[in-house]
Amino acid sequence: MTTSHRRVGDQPWVRRSLIGIAVLLAMVMLVIPVVVIFAQALSAGWSTFAGNVTDQYTLHAIGLTLFVAALTVPLNLVFGTALAWSVTRFRFPGRKLLITLIDIPFAVSPVIAGLLYLLLYGRNGWLGSWLATHDMQLMFAWPGIVLVTVFVTCPFVARELIPLMQQQGSEEEEAGVVLGASGWRIFRKITLPNIKWALIYGVVLTNARAVGEFGAVSVVSGNVRGQTNTLPLHVELLYQDYNVVGAFASASLLAAIAMLTLVVKAFVEWRQSRPIVSTPEKEVS
Amino acid sequence: MSASANTSVAIGRRFSVRSKRVLPGFGLSLGISLFFVSLVLLLPLTGLVVETSGMTWDQFWFTITDPRVVESYKVTLWTALAASLFNGCFGLLLAWILVRYDFPGKRILDAFVDLPFALPTAVAGITLATLFAQNGWYGQWLAKLGVEVAFTPLGIVVAMAFTSLPFVVRTVQPVLEELSPADEEAAVSLGASDGRVFRKVIFPALWPALVTGIALSFTRSLGEFGAIIFIAGNTPYVSEVTSLMVFIRLQEYDYAAASAIASVVLLASLILLFAINLWQGRYLRRLEGR
C-alpha cells in the first residue's frame, strides 16, 4: 500500500463515498446504540441513576455476577493456556478435531447450552439425580450459573493464543530445553512474555462474556431476585417490569465493561504491532 | 472476533516433521485439555441423548414438526440469512475502508467493530428495542416511511445483524491486508476499469474469506436469543425464533420437547461448524499451493 501506483478505489470520490456510507452505517449500528444506553440510564438524572445502581437487588446482582466471573476466568485461563500449548507445541492424532471441538460453544445457541446442563445436572438428569441423593443441587443455584458460564466462555483464551503461538513457533522454547531449563521456567521466562498481551485480551474477552452471558444463564438460574439473579438477568427483569430507566442503569454498567474491553483490545493490538515478530514462516525451512 | 476467524491460521499445517516432543508438558497440557473438553463440552451432550432417546420416534417427529415449531424454523432461517447477507455487504465495506483508506477516527471505528461481541446480548436487545420502538430515535422516522421494525420479524433481522456484525469484517480484513498490489496495479495500468479489476482480480482472492465470514455470521444468528427476544415481539407463528421455542418448552417443564427441538438446532449448528472448518482447511491449502 506504500507504492505510488494507483489501486482500485483510489479516486477521491470513490474513497469519500465509501468512507461516508460505512461511517454512517457504523454510527447508526454501533455508536448511537451505546449513546442510547447511557442517555437512557441518566435520563432521570444522576441521583436516580445512583439510586438505581445502589438498589439492594442491583447490588446483589453485581456481586453475584462478579463472583461468577471470578470463578470462571481463572478456570478458562488454565484450560485455554494448556490447550493452546498442547495443540501448538506438539503434533498428535486428533489434534485438528480438538481444535474444532473447542469451537462448539461458538456454534451452540446459549439456550441449548443451558438446556444441556439442565438435562445433565437437573433433578431428572443421570448425574443430577445422583448428586441430589447426596444433597447437592447445582441447577437453579450459583454453581449451575458458573458451569454454563464456563461452557460458554471456554474458547476465548485458547482462540486468542493458538494463532499467535503457532506463528511464533517453538524454537525459543527448544533452545531453553537444550540449555537445561525446567518446563515451568521455560513457560514463565520464554512463552509467557511472548504471549502476554494475547493472554490479557483473552482474559478480558472471557470476562466480558462471563459477565454478560444471558441465554444460558437464564435457563439454569431460576431468576430468584436477590439470590440467583445475575446482572444481565436483572436488566431483563427490570425491563419487563417497565422500569426502563432502572434497566438501562444496570445495562450501562455492563456497557461500561464492554467499552473497557474494546479499549484493552485496541491497546493490545497497538502493543503487538510494535515489536516485529522474531521469525515468522520458519516452518518452510 | 478474530477467534473463529483464526481457525484458518490455527489449522495451518507444518511441513517439517521435526524432532518429536522436545518440549516438556505434553502429558500435562493435553491431559488438562482432554479432561476439560470431555467434562465441559462432551459430557453435557449425554444428557440430551438420554432425554431424546426416552422418546419414541413418532413422539420425536411429532414434536419437531409441530406447526408452530416449523414456523419458527422458517422465521429463524430467513432472518438469519437476511442478517448474514447484510453483514456480508456491510462487513466487506467496513473491512475495505479500514484496510485501504486513512481517515480520522479510523482506529476508533476499528475498535468499535468488536462492540457486538463485547456487549451483553440482553443489553443489545433492550437498546435496539428502545431505538426501534414507535417513539424511539429510529422508530419514529421509520414509522413515517411506513416501516415497522420492533415486534416484527424485521426486528429479528436487526438484532441478528447487530450481534454477528464483526464476523465478516474480521475474516475479510486479514485477507485484504495481505492482497498483493502487483496484480491489481498491472490490471489498472493495462486500462481495466476499477469495477472490472475488483471483479476479476480482487474478488476471486477475497470470496473464500467472505463466505467464511457470512457462514460464521449465519451460524451465530441461528442460535441468537438474548438480543432477539426483546425486539421480536415473540408472536407465535410470526416472530418466534427456534431458540425461543426451546426456551418456551423449558418454561412449560416439557424437557423432552425442548430436547427434541434443541437436537435439531444442535445438529444443524454442528454440521455448519464442521463444514466451516473443512472449508477453511481447503481454502488454506489452496493458498499454500500458490
Image (cartoon, rainbow, N blue to C red):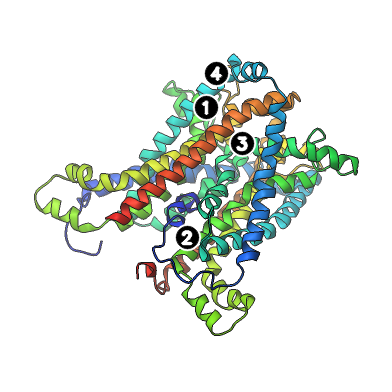
10 Å crowding of disc 4: few (<14), some (14-19), many (20+):
some
Task: Name the side, left or right, on which A24 lies relative to A136.
Answer: left
N-terminal label among 4 and 1? 4
The three-letter amino acid code for the residue at tag 2 is Pro
- Spatial separation of the CA atoms under disc 3 and disc 4: 20 Å
Tell me the tag on residue B226: 3
* In this view, the mark in front (1 or 3): 1
- Marked residue chain, label 1: B
Residue A102 in the figure: left or right of residue B205:
right
- Disc 3 to disc 2, C-alpha distance: 30 Å
Cα distance between the residues tagged 2 and 4: 40 Å
Q: Chain of mark 4?
A: B
Labels 4 and 1 touching (C-beta < 8 A): no
Please indicate, yes or no, whether residue A253 appears anywhere in the rendered image.
Answer: no
- Residue at 60% from the left image edge and 34% from the top image edge: B225
Q: Badge 4 is on which residue? A: B71
Same chain for mark 4 and mark 1? The answer is yes
Q: Are marks 2 and 4 on the same chain?
A: no
Marks 4 and 1, how far apart in space?
Answer: 9 Å
Q: Residues within 10 Å of mark 1 (few under 14, many from 20)?
A: many
Is tag 3's residue or tag 4's residue first in the polypeptide sequence?
4
Q: Percent x, y for residue B190?
A: 9, 51
Horizontal arrangement in the rendering, residue B131 relative to residue B249 (left or right):
left
Where's residue A19, x and y in %?
Answer: 32, 48
Callout 3 touching callout 4 (CB < 8 Å): no
Quickly name the residue at label 2: A163
Amino acid of disc 3: Gly
Q: Secondary structure at mark 1?
A: helix
